Image: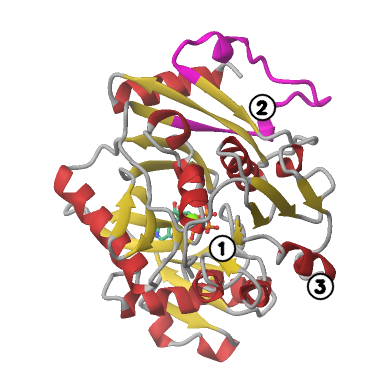
Amino acid sequence: MKPNTPILPPAMLGILGGGQLGRMFTVAAKTMGYVVTVLDPDPNAPAAEFADRHLCAAFDDEAALNELAQCVAVTTEFENVNADAMRFLAQHTVVSPSGDCVAIAQNRIQEKAWIQKAGLQTAPYQAICQAEDISAASAALLPGILKTATLGYDGKGQIRVKTLDELKAAFAEHGGVDCVLEKMVDLRGEISVIVCRLDSDNVQTFDPAENIHENGILAYSIVPARLPQDIQLQARQMAQRLADELDYVGVLAVEMFVVGDTHELVVNEIAPRPHNSGHHTLDACAADQFQQQVRLMCGLPPADTRLLSACCMANILGDVWQEDGGEPDWLPLQSDASSFLHLYGKKAARKGRKMGHFVTLAADADAAFQKAAALHGKL
Ligand code: ATP
Ligand code: MG
């Protein structure tokens, strides 16, 4: 839902979730002069450092939700929040994106069916909710990936399978929870498009980001994506179509696979929030994705999404910290005039944990990627 009249500073804004996305949202909102309340059960939540108020409670804590409902508008930083919590808040204040939009992104089975209904392609798939669902039809989807329908992120909850026996074993390994079997597609690349939408007259998309994963986790996002212009335009149109279909209010990320020689675009999944692949917007675009999130929840039109420089965003995982918790060597990165470090203030560095990122600007996408990879190697 969008507010009836624009919400202006110093109104109080709320966010469900205080991780790195919540932190960058909070910084953007505070910079514009809003007051921010964050709900997150972690006493060390990254957003708490900047927020005016940290409600340290569970996401379904009634008293905390009632407090959050005092905010003039509320948004979320992640889709695994209870959609019911969003719906509860919506009875008391302006909530965007809507609980319904969040619910679609929570379940891969619903999400894929909905994407196809919107007229876009997904990888061929089958819902597997009980062992009996594994049939001759499943064989046509092999080799494939068995993904849990809910709560997957950073490649967690995924098992690659080549045979029906492996599929059966993988389903058992997932504990018999609802799953999706997806055919492995001939992946030539991965891109994502971030849509900023207030209503049908006020929609902007950021340039598609080309995403490179390592061990199932996003490692680099390169912008502009090294893909033909017509494919990039098509990607932006597809993402906007999904946002329109949802009558979406807020920031929506759409992940796509680039498939085969023809660069066919297949939608992988959507995220009803700013996205890791949009962190470059903080340093390389006229407006960044968190400023957009603030504007849109406040009923203001999206700001200029223009890319000001070719760039590459590199994630910094806990892996680069020393065994004893010692900091990586930040000097090469911090000495570089066209690279910008963002750390999330997380206390404990664990393998695979996203601790921060940096953005490198350069003359073109290739140069930005090469330089970012070289700097990352020195951490
Ligand atoms: P994230 O949180 O990074 O989005 P996730 O856990 O939601 O990850 P997916 O996006 O579904 O998982 O898949 C993770 C990665 O696995 C993809 O980015 C892609 O590299 C690969 N992958 C997933 N599905 C397929 C497929 N059908 N064919 C080929 N590769 C795939
Ligand atoms: Mg994904």
Local secondary structure at mark 3: helix
Mark 2 vs 3, N-terminal side: 3
Cα separation between marks 2 and 3:
39 Å
Q: In this rendering, would 200 be left or right of 8?
A: left
Task: Determine the image quadrant of residue 149.
Answer: bottom right
Q: State the residue at coordinates (32%, 45%).
A: 208
| x and y percentages locating residue 236 in the rendered image | 27, 54
Badge 2 vs badge 3, beta-carbon distance below 8 Å: no
Residue behind label 1 places its C-beta within 8 angstroms of ligand 1: no
Magenta residues span 313-339
Local secondary structure at mark 2: helix
Q: State the residue at coordinates (61%, 63%).
A: 157
Q: State the residue at coordinates (63%, 71%).
A: 86
- Judge whether 260 appears above or below 307 on screen: below
In the picture of the structure, the residue carrying the numbered disc 2 is: 320
In the picture of the structure, the residue carrying the numbered disc 3 is: 62
Please indicate, yes or no, whether residue 125 appears anywhere in the rendered image.
Answer: no
Q: How is the image coloured?
A: secondary structure
Cα separation between marks 3 and 1:
37 Å
Q: In this rendering, would 19 be left or right of 155?
A: right
Mark 3 vs 1, N-terminal side: 3
Judged by depth in the image, the label closer to the viewer, 2 or 3, is: 3
In the picture of the structure, the residue carrying the numbered disc 1 is: 159
Local secondary structure at mark 1: strand
Q: Residue furthest bottom?
A: 132
**The magenta stretch spans residue 293:** no
The amino acid marked with disc number 2 is Val
| x and y percentages locating residue 140 in the rendered image | 35, 77
Q: In this rendering, would 214 be left or right of 286?
A: right
